[in-house]
Image (tube, rainbow, N blue to C red):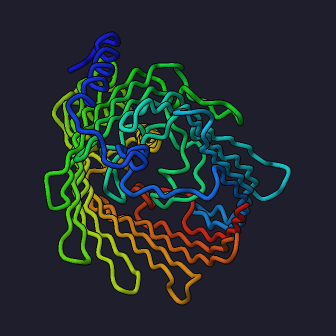
């Protein structure tokens, strides 16, 4: 199922114009000003409309293949602005500048990531229009988000591997987004046009070829069914390709456990066919993430999640690719990394977050990714100390597995890193 550009624009206007007529106005205009469609937590009022932080990091990585160890240094500056510029108008800007060095300070690499830059117009309490570069994030799962449709090509500079950082510190897509709210739900419509053909790693490029290589559209609707259950349905389309259907749902099991399921499905080519350009093997394929989060009285939260990617090769195909076709294996892995998808069909994700672990100023986070198809694994642990306007953190990562496995093939085997972030 595809849509022409003219039909996409008409549909966007019709849906956003009709929804307020069908919906009752929200009881609190201040609440309705907070856009709900792509957020799962309540937004709180900020003390100021800008935030600026600087982070310095030093690390040491031991490498495979008798390559020894390598030291790394990074200096990052992050700026976020969300401010009112006129009645019913606000401006949003988010930018990250990273300077990296390896071994010595004369081999630096500069990367600027314009994460967001858009204007927002709210003509009525229940309606908002946004235009510009927007980081549209979807999905209720923690380790893998099948409905996070705008993730491909978005991570220009990775500073941490935890999922929250990967979602937040990425460049958005240029789009027009309309949102409307009512008492029990929300409707979002997005149009994201083709603007460039090739991605670039130039230091200060907008890199529109990474985020806007195709015409894309998305519709998302959520409505409360009762007892705190609010499913979300999504319909996503790319120019000249079949549309994909998405679904998100969370539910409370007892006082301390939350269950969730996230699914996306539709007719599509396999990842192998797309990466290696081996021909059209279009069929119906599904992606799934489902899990539980349990929170204790001591502020320890543990998430266990199962991930499935029906567009990835089966275990025997993945094993054969790594052993018999190294060039194709490398090409496929590069494609998967850019798409931010799973290279194999099945995996498990476990995440633990302990706030105020030993004192009120210490947080401990840890994650484990385990590939069920090739038995490789990635383990990561972080301890973070907060005081005043600064954070001090130490991170450790270990990649383990066979030579052609997902994590065993990574050049870095172990990584230790120290970080200091100051908030202005």
Question: Residue 324 occupies which quadrant of the picture?
Answer: top left
Q: Is residue 106 left or right of residue 71?
A: right
Quadrant where the C terminus lies?
Answer: bottom right
Q: In the image, residue 334 lies at what x, y percent? A: 47, 41
* Image quarter of residue 180: top left
Q: Is residue 343 visible?
A: no
Q: In this rendering, is residue 29 above or below 198?
A: below
Residue found 61% across the figure and 42% down from its top: 83
User: Looking at the rendering, which quadrant does residue 60 occupy?
Assistant: bottom right
Query: 279 or 355: nearer the eye?
Result: 355
Horizontal and vertical percent for residue 144?
Answer: 34, 54
Q: Residue at x 59, y 36 (%)?
A: 91
Looking at the picture, tell me which residue is in the foreground, 13 or 144: 13
Q: Position of residue 336 (x, y in %)?
A: 41, 42
Residue occupying the far top of the picture: 6
- Residue 197 visible to an observer of this rendering: yes
Q: Residue at x 49, y 70 (%)?
A: 380
- In the rendered image, the residue lying farthest to the right is 106
Count the numbered circles shown.
Answer: 0
Q: Is residue 411 left or right of residue 424?
A: left
Quarter the N terminus occupies: top left
Q: Which residue is at 43% across, 69% downward? A: 367
Residue sitting farthest toward the bottom: 358
């Amino acid at each position: 199922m595809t849509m022409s550009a003219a039909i996409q624009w008409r549909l966007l206007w019709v849906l956003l114009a009709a929804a307020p007529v069908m919906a009752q106005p929200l009881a609190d205009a201040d609440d309705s000003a907070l856009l709900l469609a792509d957020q799962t937590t309540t937004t709180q009022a900020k003390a100021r409309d800008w935030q600026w932080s600087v982070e310095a990091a030093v690390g040491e990585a031991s490498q495979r293949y008798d390559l020894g160890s390598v030291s790394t240094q990074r200096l990052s500056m992050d700026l976020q602005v969300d401010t009112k510029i006129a009645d019913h108008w606000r401006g949003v800007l988010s930018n990250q500048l990273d300077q990296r060095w390896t071994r010595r300070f004369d081999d630096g690499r500069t990367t600027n990531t314009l994460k967001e830059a858009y204007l927002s117009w709210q003509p009525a309490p229940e309606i908002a229009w946004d235009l510009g570069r927007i980081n549209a994030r979807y999905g209720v799962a923690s380790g893998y988000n099948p409905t996070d449709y705008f993730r491909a090509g978005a991570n220009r500079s990775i500073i941490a591997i935890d999922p929250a950082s990967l979602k937040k510190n990425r460049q958005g897509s240029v789009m027009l987004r309309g949102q409307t709210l009512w008492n029990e739900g929300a409707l979002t419509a997005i149009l994201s046009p083709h603007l460039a053909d090739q991605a670039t790693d130039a230091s200060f490029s907008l890199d529109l070829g990474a985020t806007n290589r195709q015409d894309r559209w998305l519709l998302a609707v959520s409505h409360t069914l009762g007892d705190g259950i609010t499913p979300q349905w999504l319909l996503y389309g790319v120019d000249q390709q079949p549309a994909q259907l998405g679904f998100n749902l969370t539910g409370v099991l007892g006082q301390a456990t939350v269950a969730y399921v996230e699914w996306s499905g539709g007719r599509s080519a396999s990842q192998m066919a797309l990466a290696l350009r081996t021909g059209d093997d279009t069929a119906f394929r599904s992606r799934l993430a489902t899990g539980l989060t349990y929170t204790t009285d001591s502020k320890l939260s543990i998430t266990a999640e199962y991930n499935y990617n029906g567009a990835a090769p089966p275990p025997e195909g993945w094993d054969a690719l790594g052993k018999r076709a190294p060039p194709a294996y490398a090409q496929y892995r590069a494609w998967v990394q850019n798409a931010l998808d799973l290279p194999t069909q099945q995996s498990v994700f476990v995440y633990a977050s302990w706030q105020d672990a030993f004192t009120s100023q210490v947080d401990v986070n840890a994650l484990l990714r385990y590939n069920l198809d090739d038995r490789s694994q990635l383990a990561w642990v972080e301890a973070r100390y907060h005081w005043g306007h600064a954070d001090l953190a130490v991170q450790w990562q270990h990649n383990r597995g066979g030579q052609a496995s997902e994590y065993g093939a990574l050049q870095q085997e172990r990584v230790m890193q120290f970080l200091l972030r100051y908030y202005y």
